[in-house]
Amino acid sequence: MAKNIAILAFSGGLDSTISIDWIKENYGYDVITLTVDLGGGQFSNDLEKRAKKAGALDCVILDVRKEFSTEYILPSLKAGIIYEDNYLLATSIGRPLMAKKLVETAYKYNAKAVAHGCTGKGNDQVRFDTAIKTLSANEPLEIIAPAREASLTRDEEKEYAEKLGIKLPGVEERVYSIDRNLWGLAIEGEDLEDPWVEPPEDAYLITNSVDNTPDKPSYLELSFKEGVPIKLNGKNSDFLDIIEELNIKAGDHGVGRVVHVENRLVGIKSREVYEAPAATVIHEAFQSLEKLVLNRDQSRMKNFVSNTYSDLVYDGRWFSGLRENLDAYCKSSCRYMTGDVRIKLFKSKCEVVGAKSPYSLYSYDLATYSNDDKFKHGSAVGFIDIYSLPSRIQRKQQVHDELTD
Ligand code: ARG
C-alpha cells in the first residue's frame, strides 16, 4: 500500500532539510517538499538536489511573486498596515499565501498532512496553522511542525544533519533567524536578543549602513492610480517590478531599517530588526497622497481601519470575513488615490518632497498667506461664535476653577 504523504514547506535551510527525515522517521510518511518563492531572492538553485538527497519523494517549487504582490501586498498597502508603528508586516502577509499553497499542493498530491518549520514560540505557527485549518475546513489536513514537536537546539540539528551525511553551506557561520520576501526581511537571534545591544552591521542584508550610502541624494517619482503604484519615474511598470527596483534603489541609500521590540501574539516580547526599503518608500508615498485626497474624517477612519487590519494580519487572521469587509472599505477609500509623489532618498532617510493629484482637496487660494488669498476671513468670526457656544455656556453655568485658583 502506498504511504501517506506530507507536504513540507521547504527553504533548503538546516531546519527544513532535517525535517524531511524527521517526518519520515516519526510519522512514517513520504515527504514532498514545497518551496514557495515570495521574492526577495532567497533560495539557492540546488533545492531539488538538497531535498532529494535528504530523502524527499519529490520537490515542488512555485514562483508566486506576482500573486503575492497583487493579492497580498497591494491590499496591505491600500490598508496602510504597520504593526505597532514600525513593522510593515512582510512575514505576516507572506505566511497565509504559503499556507494556501501548502493546502493546494496537499490536495493535488492527495496528501494526508502538511508540515512547516515553525517553533512553538512565535507568531508564524499561529499564522500557518490558522490559515491551514481555515482553508481546509471542509477536508481537514493533519499539521506537522517538527521544530515545535521535537524542539531541537541548533547544535542538535547540526548533529542530526551530520548523522544523515548532509552538509549544508553556511551552517557553521553564526546564524540569525531570517525570513525574507519581496516586501521585506525579519531578522532575529544572536546579539539582537539583547535590547541594550546595538544591532551589528552583519545583521542587515539588503540595506547599506549610512556610512556606505551615496553622498548625493536620489530623487524618485512614483505614480498611483486608485491606490495602485503604476509608474516609477514616469515609466509604466508592473507593481512587482516597482517593488524589486525600489528594494535596490532605496536599499542602496540605507532606507527601511527598523529596530523593534514587539509584542508577539503568544505573549512574548521579541527584539528584532527589519529591512523593508521598497515597502517604506511606497508606504510613505501612499500616505502623502492620502493627505491630499482624504478629508479629516476619512483620515481618522482610515487610521482606525489600518490599526484593526494590522492586528488582524499580525495575529494570523488573513482569511477572515473581517478582512474582506475592511478591504471593501479600503477600496472605497482609494477611489481618488490617483497622483504623483516625489521622493528624496538620502543617508537612510526617505522624504516625500512633493505630491500632486487631480483629486487633491488642497486649495492654494484658501491656504495661501499671499495676495492671492481668497479665504473669507470675516466668516471665521461667525463660525467661532457658534463653535464656542457650548463651552461658553458651560463656563457660565459650571466651570469656574482655573482662573480663580
Ligand atoms: N516578528 C515578525 C512577525 O511575527 C517576524 C517573524 C519572522 N520570523 C523569522 N524567522 N525571523 O511577523
Image (tube, rainbow, N blue to C red):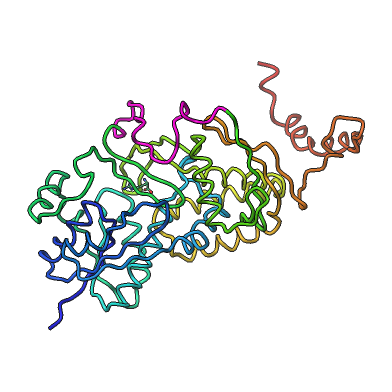
Residue that protrudes farthest toward the left in the picture: 163
96 to the left or right of 27: right
Residue that protrudes farthest toward the top in the picture: 405
User: Most prominent secondary structure in the magenta stretch?
Assistant: loop
Q: Quadrant of residue 189?
A: top left
201 in magenta: yes
Which residue occupies 16% across, 65% down?
55
**Above or below, comparing residue 175 to residue 310 in the picture:** above
Which residue occupies 77% across, 32% down?
392
**Above or below, comparing residue 384 to residue 150 in the picture:** above
Q: Position of residue 124 (x, y in %)?
A: 33, 53
111 to the left or right of 299: left
Q: Position of residue 21 (x, y in %)?
A: 14, 62
Give the tally of numbered discs: 0
Residue that protrudes farthest toward the bottom in the picture: 1
Q: Nearer the viewer, residue 387 or 188?
A: 188
**Above or below, comparing residue 21 to residue 169 in the picture:** below
Q: Quadrant of residue 118?
A: bottom left
232 in magenta: no
Instruction: Tell me which segment is drawn in magenta.
Output: 192-215
In which quadrant of the rendered image does the N terminus lie?
Answer: bottom left
300 to the left or right of 189: right
**Above or below, comparing residue 288 to residue 392 in the picture:** below
Q: Position of residue 105 (x, y in %)?
A: 32, 72
Q: Position of residue 41 (x, y in %)?
A: 39, 52
Which residue occupies 88% across, 30% down?
370
In which quadrant of the rendered image does the C terminus lie?
Answer: top right
